[in-house]
Image (tube, rainbow, N blue to C red):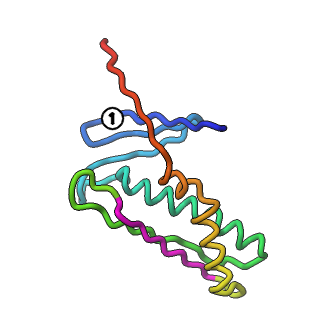
Amino acid sequence: MSKRNVTVRMKADYEYEAVNQQGNVVEIDMYDAPNKKAQSPMDLLLSALAGCGSVDAVGMMKKKRKTIVDFYVEAEGDRNDGIPAFYKSIHLRFVLVSPDATEEEFKKVVALSVEKYCSVASSLKSEITFSAEVIRP
């Protein structure tokens, strides 16, 4: 089993910074528009899911030797009105611009990507545990 770690640190009341083991940084904020400078945690969840599905789908299409002129995923989440405002449903729209790929083969690739290979999609079904501690200065 491999482990991954990130540390999220508060920078200001509505600003955070996530850093992984390699030192890569992702800015997070909870501001409303027009003050928003970074993605919220819920935006990042959609980004992670779409990004994970993208890597697998593109990889499979390249293995099929298909030409990729453009590729993108639009992720839309429908959130609960109450608290917590979790995603009740998420829709991913995969778009491939290619002169030699068929819609049928791309649909199969996308289904494999999301349902079998995407670690983020599988993680949304996982058990989550937590602990908490207070450190006194």
Q: Is residue 56 toward the left or the right of residue 31 in the image? A: right
Where on the picture, by quarter, is residue 56? bottom right
Which residue bears the numbered disc 1? 11
Q: Is residue 32 toward the left or the right of residue 60 in the image? A: left
Q: Residue at x 43, y 55 (%)?
A: 45
Q: Which residues are magenta?
A: 87-97
Q: Residue at x 54, y 75 (%)?
A: 94
**Most distant residue in the left direction:** 82
Q: Residue at x 60, y 79 (%)?
A: 96
Majority secondary structure of magenta residues? strand
Q: Position of residue 130 (x, y in %)?
A: 41, 33
Sort mark 1 into few (<14), some (14-19) or many (20+) by Cα contacts within 10 Å. Answer: few
For residue 65: magenta?
A: no
Mark 1 is on which residue type?
Lys
Q: Position of residue 109 (x, y in %)?
A: 66, 73
Where is the N terminus found, in terms of image quarters?
top right
Q: Position of residue 125 (x, y in %)?
A: 49, 53
Q: Is residue 109 toward the left or the right of residue 129 in the image? A: right
